[in-house]
Structure formats: structure tokens, C-alpha cells
């Protein structure tokens, strides 16, 4: 049997479930594998170390994440925290900070001020379960409003 010069000599990928392949690769290597644009992408950094850096950075930014919006003159800022199952509505930006904060828990609705003037029902917002492999959302629709 002769091989044409245009015929590739490398094996073709076999069809399969990319999620299964990603999970098996994660188990074998200990590295995080994601599916991006239909392709498997491996994280070069162990997820635990990366998550620690992200947590430390977020703690520093949390001291100022709402003030950025107040400085920009954003009239109100709804913030949700799916880890704690809470929300907060920051209002009345003045002098680079929000003057009022209305706190609440998932399950309680919050009325957004004008120009939206709508009631947001937080009853369907899932609370993330924090596990050693990272946060996992409970079943249900979820939209993070900010942060």
C-alpha cells in the first residue's frame, strides 16, 4: 500500500465527550482543564495556588470594588455574593463612596431605584458550595450582577 504525499501520517482524533476527557486529564495530572471554544486548555498553575492568589487580590480590591463605581457616578450598585447567599444595594454615590447600603439575603427581593425601578427576585439565586475543588453552584439559573 502506498501513501500519498498529501495524506497526513499522524492519527486523527477520535470523537468523544470533551468533558470526560477533561475530567480524566484533571484526575491524572492534578491540573485544571477547561473546554474553551471546543478545545481542551490546561492551566499551567496548580489550582490551589492560583485560587489563593485570586482570594488575596480580591480581598484587597473588595476594600475599594464599590468605590470605583461611586467615583464614576454610577447611581446604584447591586452586589451579590453567591458564597454567602447575600446581596447588597449600594446607593447615593457622593465624594467617591456610596452613602447607603441596603443588605439582604437570597430569597428576599430588592427594588432597584430609577431609572430601572424594577423588583429583583433573588429567590432563584443559587448559593455556591465551597468544596476542596472550588465553588460549585447549586442547580438553577444564576446571574452575578456585579463583582
Image: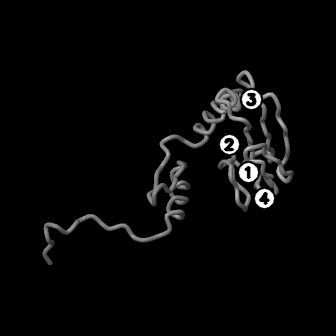
SS category of the residue bearing label 1: loop
SS category of the residue bearing label 2: loop
- Find the distance from the CA under tag 2 to the CA under tag 3: 16 Å
Task: Read off the residue under disc 3.
Answer: 93
Q: Which badge, 4 or 3, is on the more N-terminal residue?
A: 3
Image point (82%, 47%), residue name: 111
Q: Are marks 2 and 4 in contact (CB under 8 Å)?
A: no
* Circle number at residue 146: 2
* Circle number at residue 124: 4
Q: Nearer the viewer, mark 1 or mark 3?
A: 3
- Find the distance from the CA under tag 2 to the CA under tag 4: 17 Å
Picture coordinates of residue 79, whole percent (x, y): 74, 41
SS category of the residue bearing label 3: strand
- Find the distance from the CA under tag 4 to the CA under tag 1: 13 Å
Q: Which badge, 1 or 2, is on the more N-terminal residue?
A: 1
| 133 vs 89: above or below | below
Q: Which badge, 2 or 3, is on the more N-terminal residue?
A: 3
Amino acid at each position: 500500500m502506498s501513501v500519498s504525499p498529501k495524506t497526513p501520517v499522524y492519527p486523527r482524533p477520535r470523537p468523544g465527550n470533551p468533558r470526560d476527557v477533561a475530567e480524566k486529564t484533571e484526575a491524572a495530572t492534578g491540573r485544571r482543564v477547561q473546554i474553551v471554544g471546543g478545545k481542551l486548555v490546561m492551566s499551567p498553575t496548580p489550582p490551589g495556588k492560583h485560587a489563593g492568589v485570586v482570594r488575596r487580590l480580591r480581598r484587597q480590591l473588595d476594600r475599594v470594588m464599590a468605590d470605583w463605581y461611586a467615583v464614576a457616578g454610577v447611581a446604584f450598585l447591586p452586589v451579590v455574593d453567591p458564597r454567602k447567599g447575600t446581596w447588597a444595594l449600594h446607593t447615593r454615590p457622593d465624594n467617591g463612596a456610596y452613602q447607603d447600603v441596603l443588605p439582604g439575603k437570597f430569597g428576599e427581593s430588592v427594588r432597584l431605584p430609577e431609572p430601572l425601578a424594577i423588583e429583583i427576585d433573588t429567590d432563584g439565586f443559587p448559593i455556591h458550595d465551597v468544596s476542596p475543588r472550588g465553588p460549585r453552584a447549586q442547580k438553577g439559573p444564576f446571574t452575578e450582577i456585579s463583582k
